[in-house]
Amino acid sequence: MSDVHASLRSPLVTGDKTISDVTRDICAPMDRKPTALWWSAFGLSLTALIVGVAAVWYQIATGIGTWGLNKTVGWAFDITNFVFWVGIGHAGTLISAVLFLFRQKWRTAVNRSAEAMTLFAVMCAGIFPLIHMGRPWLAFWMMPYPNTRGPLWVNFKSPLLWDVFAISTYLAISAVFWYVGLLPDLATIRDRSEPGWRKRITSILCLGWNGSARTWLRYETVYLLLAGLATPLVFSVHTIVSMDFATAVIPGWHTTIFPPYFVAGAIFSGLAMVLTLMIIARKVMQLEDYITMTHIDRMCKLMMSMGCIVGLAYGTEFFMAFYSGNGYEQFVFKNRALGPFAWAYWTMVSCNVLIPQLLWSRKLRSTLPVVFVIVILVNVGMWFERFVIIVTSLHRDFLPSSWASYAPTSIEIATFVGSFGLFFTCFLIFCRIAPVIAIAEIKGAAHLKKRPPAESITEEKAA
Amino acid sequence: MSTEDSLTNPQRSFEAANVTRRNSVLRRLAVAGAVVLACGIAFSAERVWSNLLVGTFYLLTIALGGALFVALTYVSGGGWHVAFRRIPEAMAAVLPVAGVAMLVVLGVRMSRYGWHHDWHGDVGTFWFKELWLTPSFWAVRAVAYVSLWSLLAGWLVARSRKQDRTGDASITGGNVRISALFLAVYAVTFSLASADWMMALEPMWFSTMWGVYNFAGMIQAALAVVIVLGLILRSNGGPLQGVFNDEHLHDLGKLLLGFSCFWMYIWFSQYMLIWYSNIPEETSYFITRTHGPWGPIVVGCIVLNWVIPFFVLLPKPAKRSSGIMMKVAIVVLIGRWVDLYVMVFPSTLGENPVFGIWEAASISCLIGTAGLLLFRSFANAGSVPRHDPFLPESLHYHTC
Amino acid sequence: MSDRVLLATFEHEDDLLAATDAVRRSGFKIVDAFTPYAVHGLERAMGLRPSRLTWVCFLCGMIGVLGMLWFEHWSTSIDWKLDVGGKPWNSLPSDVPVAFEAAVLLAGFGSVFALLAVSRLFPGKQPQIINPRVTDDRFLLVIDEADAGFDTAAVRKMLQEFHALAVEEKITLPGGDLQ
């Protein structure tokens, strides 16, 4: 196929690789024994996870009274963490689906790990509302099944129920998308493994994939369909999350821009997390030829533009609060910027809007330590964004006599730490057992080196 | 090969007779519409002005949408669109004319904006609104928006045309930076402009989504215009024959489908949140528009802007068919007019929708003027950016 | 399909595409091709029709959205009427989000299961692997030796023009597997 490519384009894969080099390089980390670095990271994550499990065990046994919530601030740490984790997940879908539709071929280097990140982040997110129910063992009541309580159906007019449907659909579709993407690569692992447990497991999991062109045609169609479905899905999920707030009449929560603003914020925070993981992974797993500086550069630009959109939304909210003439709205925004939680507000503004502006400079975008610090700060800033929205709007509401403050308890912090433990434990295991880069996709997208035919024929005969 | 032909002869004139006929039809539409509207001032100045507001905003947002398309494709590093980039560039080049028309229309009836007579005595929590909508400040802002857009978009287009003469590939890199600047300026100024010119028609109403909503409608209509112009310019030996191919059409179809859905998403989100919270100061806008005679028109607006494009463009062959794409693009352009009609008319003319000779005349004038301006603007430059480094990629790529 | 096939191995997608195109133009029947990744344009070269799975996806999506809208309407305004915040029993705007999710869920799962069914992919399937390097870096073309007039030598010569690394004859067993 004689695709014409402009000379301005930088190569997707550097280092003059052949097709089989790609297979070998990407599968290499799975064949090696885990390094000391991996073991120490895994130990740390597992410890955090155990702390989280203990905290969750304790709070379920004791009750939600172990949290720092009070009459005024009825949502705080847990919902902040919920929205934070859902948001992290969205970049995975953005990279795998939206960039696929826009034919951004560079996505092939990062989509697999970004999708894995989506799955794990959504799992982490799901934990928080589940605990918040107080009686998580009755969680199945949220499903509309015929029951002996009437049957009393679930309340389809409640945004919280929309959330149940949105998050579970998102988890299911992301998992399917990820697995369908893995099928050809699982077959690759099957065919290159020596007979043994790995070959047996991958030959079951790859569902008998044999690379037939007819299957590839259908596969590509379904992949495109899934991308087409996942794109509106990712919008709908964070839109629905934003509606948890925006359908209320609470000043600072009820504002119509919330749906697109939350989606942009989610993608922003997710890209920051993808970059965090990628910068570490390419170094540790020696994948610098695949996840190149061009990839980092593209993601930085995308992240910065999302940061600007988020900044515009902050500005719009502030502007409209004053333009509207609504005294309560005006109070909430003055209180955010100048009240007791002003420190959180300004952390959010500096981390999300001001600091990412540094990425306008190409020089800084190509300095990895700087990029790393910025993405960590964006992660922090986006957590604070949710905290600011939730807590500052609640802690001083219409009735000054019920104003209160909020501080998390050690149990809440331990649960949050535990969610990081779950996320990184899953991610580290994923890096060991699955190809972190979509092998079949990158082979199709990158224009790899051709070897002179004579050389290959000799090789074939020797084999 | 026809591609090579049009590359070596970018100025190749297409069938002269066709062009003359087209221009004379457009001129007649424009003049007839303008004459009727001018008479209309004597009968119903209010309606004529509302029509002019819709028409000029329509034209301005198409021009701005063209500039936005150019800027977005530059910064995203896209190469697929280069072959027909002169179309959105032609749209962007209309910005100064459209901007001046907008300023004139706004200027002649600044008093139409309710806040001129709404404020008496103590302003209380409305101090910011009073400050923001001070007539002189409001007017200065309008001039500033229009000049900023015209300046930046003009710069972008001029440099792209310069590349035809100099063949300097570094112009592309520079245009990426100018595009980033344009986008940053655009995002802020367009949100404010849509609030100043459209939202302030009902001075007590507000919605933070308003800027995004206007952006969605704008980009959707601009895509439809690109499709219509592309199809016209490639037919009957036009300058883009063999250049603007089915692959480009397919991709534009996907984008149109996507942005139709985006428009619906934004429309629904804004409506649903206001409906759900049911706060009187916000519901006023939708009560006028969804209850009573405006209701069916709003439904029609949704059908034109989303239902038809969505279901028609979903199958792949539809996006590669000139006939279907042309029809859908025209439906979207009608939908855009209805969208602006629903935005403006209930605020200026009240609860009963009106459609008669003045509206027909304004639409005729809009089609004529927009057509003449866009075709002339396209003819002002080479029909293909022949030294753009991404051009070969754009001419040979295959969509999936 | 006759019981004899010709198997050509290539090293590059361009060669496979060109060879496939040439073989089909010469009037031979292509059984299948095996590639390590989705080769763009191969479906055109092989003369395959576009997949109809998009229709499955569309139908599942429509069933999802209409079914859920009906269920929301039935459960909240017919079976057990519940006043929520003074909203009408049958409130379309608040029914949309869940109906949308149902559409996506059904469309996604529907098209994936249809793919697996049509391509006969299932856990535990033991596919016939002609060359294990086909999931790594080899491209295979399988041509049907349809009639007695099939000139193996001529086809072999033609394939070698496209840098075929190896061309071999195989006999198919009952059930379509190759020996």
Image (spheres, coloured by chain):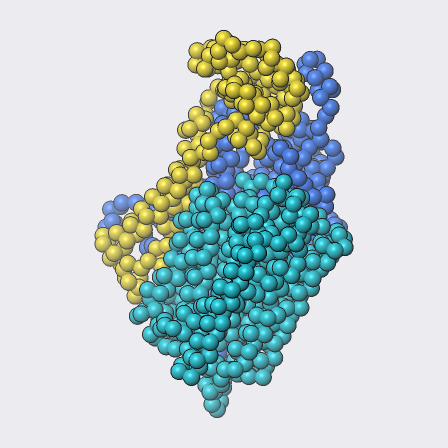
Residue A185 vs B245, above or below: the answer is above
Task: In the rendered view, tell whether residue C155 sits above or below residue A260.
Answer: above
- In the image, residue A295 sits, relative to residue A25, either above or below, namely below
Q: Position of residue A254 (x, y in %)?
A: 45, 66
Task: Identify the residue shown where x is 57% and y is 56%.
Answer: B16
**Residue beneath the point at 47% across and 67% down:** B29
The chain painted cyan is: B
Q: Residue at x 34, y 75 (%)?
A: B351
Q: Position of residue A124 (x, y in %)?
A: 51, 47
Q: Nearer the viewer, residue B14 or A203?
A: B14
Tell me which residue sits at (60%, 63%) in the image. B376
Q: Nearer the viewer, residue A406 or A194?
A: A194
Tell which residue pokes out farthest to the bottom in this image. B121
Q: Is residue B296 above or below residue C51?
A: below
Q: Could you tell whether A430 is left or right of A25 in the image?
A: left
Residue C125: x percent and y percent? 46, 21
Q: Quadrant of residue B339?
A: bottom left
- Is residue A402 visible in the rendered image? The answer is no
Look at chain C in the picture and name its colour.
yellow
B359 sits left or right of C85 in the view: right
- Quarter that holds the C terminus of chain A: top right
Q: In the rendered image of this protein, which colour is used for chain A?
A: blue
The percent coordinates of residue A88 (x first, y second) are: 56, 50
Quadrant of residue B298 in the image? bottom left
The answer to whether one can see residue B195 in this image is yes
